[in-house]
């Protein structure tokens, strides 16, 4: 089976883990944790990093640090992994869903303002499938209405918007290091911020709310969202190769674009976009299956599976899922269409060109 995604781990990761184990610090203390936080923040052009147990925890940590609570509303794209909305619900606030942009699939900035009310607290732009959101108009709206921005950059390590790294635009930005991400710690996440105040607040909240100057004294209710030293050891090693991984992701994207461009010309698929102002990292190289495609997306998924090729459909738009479905809710036609037509192809950093050609040939065969 050709996996849709798998990590690339080697000697550097093994050596780091061995050092962490030999140090005796395998839980939430040890030298690799601050090292990983500092190095990743520096890579993204941000002052401070606060690691966490996973990307969802990072989102919850960020929202809590910004004071999001019951009665608040948070603007989120409907087309995203469900963790984005779930983290909002954890705070007691309500996610308000916005449609996708038809040309690059992220939240449509032109649809945000109409969803803002006096209860709106912040906006969470999600850099979907490795493509950056259009951050300047989003930031302009946030300033106009005095809203915070929390970037959900779980799928976009190393991506850039107008030459600047994703993760450097929000009041806080959140990353995931799950096993299928561009760099991984197995599980794990990170919050980045340029605010010393938010940095200190998130560090306290991450560690049960314990006062940093008075052991076992708790001024607030916090969480156990700490990353382990073993996870951070893997992260430090992975970070050494992040530019190489991003370059390979973009190379894989070029293979797919070349091999499948004829199908796009025939109106059978849409290739993964990259806007002129964006550097997409193609976390998972994705295509849209047109209605004219002979067998349709879901049958194609099944056919590829039989041929030993694992794929993934796009996320369901969250507003159609039972926990978030509302009577008389506005339709979000672009997100719904993308959710029905989107297909993620194998995109592991270790993917070989010949395997990529085989995947494309199998897709092409099933068109005819």
Image (cartoon, rainbow, N blue to C red):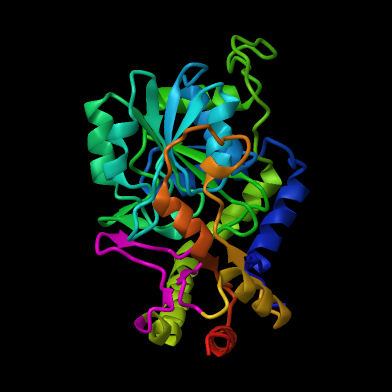
The residue that appears at 75% across and 42% down in the rendered structure is: 26
The residue that appears at 58% across and 86% down in the rendered structure is: 366
**In the rendering, at what x and y percent does residue 67 appear?**
46, 19
Which residues, given as a range, are shown in magenta?
265-293
The residue that appears at 56% across and 70% down in the rendered structure is: 297
**In the rendering, at what x and y percent does residue 312 appear?**
61, 64
Q: Is residue 274 magenta?
A: yes
Viewed as shown, does residue 58 lie left or right of 136? Answer: right
Q: Quadrant of residue 46?
A: top left
The residue that appears at 46% across and 48% down in the rendered structure is: 153
Q: Nearer the viewer, residue 173 or 119?
A: 119
Residue found at the very far front of the displayed protein: 328
Image quarter where the N terminus lies is bottom right
Q: Quadrant of residue 272?
A: bottom left
**In the rendering, at what x and y percent does residue 94 appear?**
50, 26
Magenta stretch, main secondary structure class: loop
Q: Quadrant of residue 89?
A: top right
Q: Is residue 156 visible?
A: no
């Amino acid at each position: 089976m050709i996996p849709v995604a798998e990590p690339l781990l080697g000697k550097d990761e093994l050596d780091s883990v061995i050092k962490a184990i030999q140090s005796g610090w395998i839980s939430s203390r040890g030298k690799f944790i601050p090292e990983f936080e500092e190095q990743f923040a520096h890579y993204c052009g941000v002052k401070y990093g606060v690691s966490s147990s996973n990307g969802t925890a990072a989102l919850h940590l960020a929202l809590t640090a910004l004071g999001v609570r019951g009665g608040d509303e948070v603007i989120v794209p409907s087309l995203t992994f469900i963790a984005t909305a779930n983290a909002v619900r954890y705070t007691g606030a309500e996610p308000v869903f916005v449609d996708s942009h038809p040309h690059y699939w992220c939240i449509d900035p032109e649809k945000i303002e109409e969803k803002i009310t006096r209860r709106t607290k912040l906006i969470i732009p999600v850099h979907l499938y490795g493509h950056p959101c259009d951050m300047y108009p989003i930031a302009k709206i946030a300033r106009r209405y005095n809203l915070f921005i929390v970037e959900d950059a779980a799928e976009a390590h190393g991506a850039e918007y107008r030459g600047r790294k994703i993760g450097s635009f929000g009041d806080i930005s959140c990353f995931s290091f799950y096993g299928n991400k561009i760099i991984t710690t197995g599980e794990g996440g990170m919050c980045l911020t340029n605010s010393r105040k938010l940095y200190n607040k998130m560090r306290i909240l991450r560690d049960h709310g314990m006062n940093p100057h008075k052991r076992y004294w708790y001024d607030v209710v916090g969480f156990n969202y700490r990353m382990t030293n073993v996870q951070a050891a893997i992260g430090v090693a992975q970070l050494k190769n992040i530019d190489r991984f991003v370059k390979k992701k973009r190379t894989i994207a070029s293979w797919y674009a070349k091999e499948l461009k004829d199908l796009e010309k025939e109106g059978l698929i849409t290739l993964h976009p990259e806007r002129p102002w964006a550097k997409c990292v193609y976390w998972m190289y994705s295509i849209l299956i047109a209605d004219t495609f002979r067998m349709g997306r879901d049958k194609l998924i099944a056919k590829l599976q039989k041929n030993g090729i694992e794929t993934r459909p796009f996320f369901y738009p969250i507003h159609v899922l039972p926990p978030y479905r509302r009577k008389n809710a506005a339709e979000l036609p672009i997100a719904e269409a993308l959710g029905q037509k989107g297909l993620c192809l194998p995109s592991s950093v270790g993917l070989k060109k010949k395997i990529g050609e085989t995947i494309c040939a199998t897709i092409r065969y099933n068109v005819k």
